[in-house]
Image: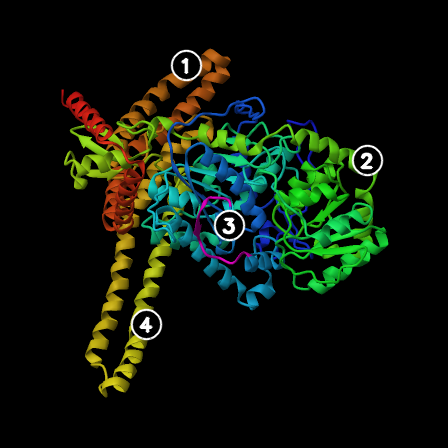
Amino acid sequence: MGNGANPDRGESPPPYSPYVDPQLTAELGNVHYDGRIDVNLESKLAKSIAKIANEQPDDHPPAPEYSAQTSEGIYCDVKLNIVIQIVGSRGDVQPFIALGNALQSHGHRVRIATHGVFEKFVKDSYLEFFPIGGDPAKLMAYMVKNPGLIPQIKTLRDGEIKQKQVMVAEMLDGCWKSCIEDDPDTKEPFVADAIIANPPSFAHVHCAQALGIPVHLMFTMPWSSTKAFPHPLANMNSTDMNPRTANWVTYGVVEWLTWQGLGDVINRFRASIDLASVPATEGPCLAEALEIPFTYCWSPALVPKPRDWPSHIDVCGFFFGEPSSYIPPAELAEFLEAGSPPVYIGFGSIVVDNPEKLIQTVLAAVSRAGVRAIVSKGWSELAGTSDENVFYIGDCPHDWLFQHVAAVVHHGGAGTTACGLLNGRPTAIVPFFGDQPFWGNMVARAGAGPSPIPHAELDPDILASAIQFCLTPDAAEAAREIALRMQAESGVAAAVDSFHRNLPLDRMRCSIMPDQAAVWSYDVGKQRLILSKTAVNILIEHDKIDARHIKCYPINPIIIENRRWDPLTGVLSAAGATGTEMAKSTGEMLYNPYKEFKRARTESAQNKARTGQSQNPFDTAGNMVGGTLTGLGKFYGNYLKGVVIDIPHAAAEGFRRAPQLYGEKPKDYGNVHDWKSGVKVGGKNFVGGMTGGVAGFFTSPFKGAMEEGAAGAVKGFARGTLGLATKMPSAAIGLTAYPFHGISKSIEAAFRTRTPKDIVSARLRDGYAHASRMQLSKEEQQEVIQIFDALLSTLHA
């Protein structure tokens, strides 16, 4: 596998062992028996992504250095309601508990939204909890069977895909509810002002778009495109493609495959919260396109930040909470004291099909290695009888236990890996899926453990050899050096700084109470006040404003557009999408009558059993005709929308962006979100396109001649001609296309009113509850009113 050099270290990371299953599209690569995929860099998709990769800068200005040992942190005086959405195992949740407690110490209100099984764990940490559904045990079992992105044939036959999609849909809905619903126990109102999430929660950016609030992603493995190293889930085949470009391409391929499996589920979720569908071309790499802030929760001593990651991406260190005040049971204490330090062996939340075979392999390896062992039962319930050499444990805090062992053997979860290294323990990793192979390779690269052992290849001899490697002086010394570097970091404090630094504080402050987040807007003529929920509650109670005259204020508006790269592909793509929608409508014209007939038969049978009377056949016929007409209406509606709006808009955008094909940066005239912005963008594009096209035709040859002489003049003439041929058509078509596109958005928004009403209702309740908790005195309330009156006077002046 080809690897690009890491510009921060002067050497390549080790090859990763991705775990992706066989049912990928045929052109993307060959799949091995163990689920690994060799990404075909000669595929059309890979080559298309490579063109984008070649336009990316190799260096970005460095982000601020985070050192919690010497820094007092980035102060944020705006206090927020923060929901942290997490999908995964206990190891995925635990780091965010530490983060949540740190955010609490800064005065924020923090709600952890995750699976119900972790409710006690969260509440015992004095954080608010909201259940999002989903069974992490079933999710882990599914991932062990299907460690990559696409399911195996057996999984398809067993119907597990449908079950997983149902679970994902449940969790998406739960994530949305976690943003706006009251506390399930206390009934205390809550509306999120910001979202922190791990990428597998999937709802994050969509919830943020619906609420107009900031979102910040945090994760334990590389998920942002870089030329420094490939995606941990991708294995590249031999190719003539530049290795650094190939590294960048793997991220796009992985994202594309992920969207193929979940795009429909996500778009159904978006429809349920009154958001338009994400175009198929925009779904992959959506977070990158929107430049969502991203914090990686690993030690920069192990994997430094690549130089081509922009400033909104940080590497902050592992997240550790306060040390556990754990008192071991007498049996465990006696075992630890009875001999040499044991080796810890456990696979945490991994759920395997055959735990009996796994424990037999473990016990045989322990015997052959000649060591004592502590075996964690984990979610696979590894069973056995303790003796003088093997002790079985249930839940036990790793931060305490790992101080008392000689080495650790585990599945390679980021939290477990970090805890072992922090305590200076050599580590052997048996990865199953996800980021586990990545961490196995990172440990091996540092010399603190052997190469990772894929779980499918695990046998007693291999595991015994790995244990013996961990007990060598070299491995112990490498682990000790890593521990010293990690102990000089504070990942949680650095992540809090990263979160605060990326907040749009200049847009967030209430005009009256600047230490509170503005969530409402109040228009005064052409001017606007932005107000917090507490300020609005006070002003409403004192009859200074009418609740009907306030609007939800988007702190962080997120607009997802179907970007076009040139006129040809833009028009073809829009035409294809229109054709697809028309085909669906044709299907409805044929299926709707049958559906109505089937429904009528069922209802008629029920009526006859209940009343002795059958349903009127004329009613059934009328409903069948109505179903056909509904499909026919959608058919013509999709046709008109495509011909009048979508295809002309795609052409205008394609021509506008075409200059980038010959090295010129296209003008950005803003986003279209309603009819007003559509008219504004159309007008700007018309003026800019006409003047730019004509001016460029005459000035480009002159500029080229000044720079490169006669050859430059020829090149300039070609650029000017191309500019004239692209900018003027964009101007002409866009003069009507952009306004029509805006009108379409306004009409769609007029029909999507349920979710906005839910948000308004929730924010009013939250404002009342927050004002009650603050218990402002009459003097303080009067001060709010006086500031409001003064602002009104200023705006009216």
624 shown above or below 326: below
Task: Bin the neighbour count of mark 2 within 10 Å (Cα to Cα): few under 14, some 14-19, many 20 and up.
Answer: some
Q: Where on the picture, by quarter, is residue 357?
A: bottom right
Residues in magenta, as a range: 125-136
Q: Residue at x 30, y 80 (%)?
A: 601
The quadrant in which the N terminus is found is top right
Would you say residue 48 is visible in this rendering?
Answer: no
Nearer the N terminus, badge 2 or badge 3? 3
Q: Residue at x 57, y 33 (%)?
A: 491
Foreground disc of the pair 4, 1: 4
Q: Residue at x 15, y 22 (%)?
A: 793
Tell whether position 400 is magenta.
Answer: no
Mark 2 → mark 1, Cα distance in angstroms: 66 Å
User: Which numbered disc covers residue 595?
Assistant: 4
Residue toward you, 130 or 688: 130
Q: What number of labels is visible?
A: 4
* Secondary structure of residue under mark 3: loop
Question: For the residue marked with disc 1, what is the amino acid?
Answer: Phe
Question: For the residue marked with disc 3, what is the amino acid?
Answer: Val
User: Which numbered disc covers residue 474?
Assistant: 2
Nearer the N terminus, badge 4 or badge 3? 3
Residue matched to label 1: 702
